[in-house]
Amino acid sequence: MENDEAVVIHSVDFSETSLIVTLFTKRFGKIEAIAKGGRRLKSPFESALDILTRINVTFIQKKNDALDILTESQLIRRFHVTQNNLHGLYAAYYIAELVNLFTERNLPNSRLYNLTSEKLCAFEKSDSINYHIAQFEFQLLYENGTKPVLSYCAECGTKIEITNPNQLIPFRQAAGGVICNKCVEKNRKFQQHYTLIKNETLKILKHFETEINNKINNKQCTNLQLSNKSINETLNLLNNCINYQLGSQPRTQKYLKHFNYTEHTLEAADTMAAKQASENKPAKVTEN
Ligand SMILES: [Zn+2]
């Protein structure tokens, strides 16, 4: 019999009285368990098996692919948002789905667990939600070992120098991060797709990276002044990174699109390149 703290990240009815729940536990990672009688009002689960709820849980671990058996649960904290904070509610559903998609069963990750419960609390307040989602996504990619490469060319390893604050930086999803101009040329030749990101976006991503490193080394992090626009652009880029890693878009991500997203911030590189080219185009020489 095991005991742990957990967040309910998924729940489906199994029978008239039972539920199958997916829990993200602090010490055991993700578990999938059957809660017999979990749908009854009077059960050993204190009606605490609703999605997004934080609970203390007792369960019997089964080997291989068999479902674990939940024997008891107590409520620690119910997720609660006010009626007008739909953004916070969808954000919470979204990170629950992400945790479920990105984690393997029985693989502990207490850092991700702490971040998940921290973010659920943050989403209850209605401010800076997109910032919190972006920060969560970045750390999820970090934990997954697929965090975007930010300071060096993801293809050849050359250091990327930012000389102009308005500079646009090429970013290639398939390479796993920013790329240098030389590699851009190479990609153009082979018609490989890349996007151009703003320096501001790169700064926020680097800030997330520093935050993680500082947390690991117990160092304080300085705050960054951010505009909503640049947060949304960063979120858009990170959504793309997440979708690329998964090979599909998480179901709940599209509900978040309504909240201040700028759909077209990441213009396709060819469009941008074409625009830049036409701006720098030399005078046309016409043949007689
Ligand atoms: Zn390169």
Image (cartoon, grey):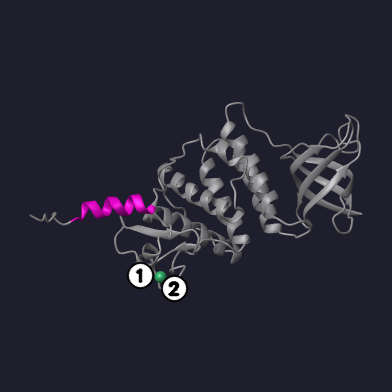
Residue closest to the eye, 10 or 129: 10
Q: Secondary structure at mark 1?
A: helix
**x, y percent for residue 182:** 35, 70
State yes or no: Cβ of the residue under disc 2 lies below 8 Å from any atom of ligand 1: yes
The quarter of the rendering in which ligand 1 is drawn is bottom left
Q: Secondary structure at mark 2?
A: loop
Circle 2 is placed at which residue position?
Answer: 156
Residue closest to the eye, 172 or 270: 270
**Could you tell whether 133 is left or right of 19 in the image?**
left
Q: Residue sitting at 55 percent across and 38 percent down? A: 256
**x, y percent for residue 270:** 36, 53
Q: What's the residue type where badge 1 is placed?
A: Lys
Q: Which residues are magenta?
A: 269-281
**Could you tell whether 12 is left or right of 224 in the image?**
right
Circle 1 is placed at which residue position?
Answer: 182
Q: Quadrant of the N terminus?
A: bottom right
Q: Residue sitting at 75 percent across and 60 percent down? A: 107
Task: Determine if residue 243 is in view.
Answer: yes
Residue closest to the eye, 121 or 159: 159
Image marks 2 and 1: residues in contact by CB distance under 8 Å: yes
Badge 2 or badge 1: first in the primary sequence: 2
State yes or no: Cβ of the residue under disc 1 lies below 8 Å from any atom of ligand 1: yes
- Answer with the quarter of the image where residue 73 lies: top right
Task: Determine if residue 125 is in view.
Answer: no
- Answer with the quarter of the image where residue 264 lies: top left
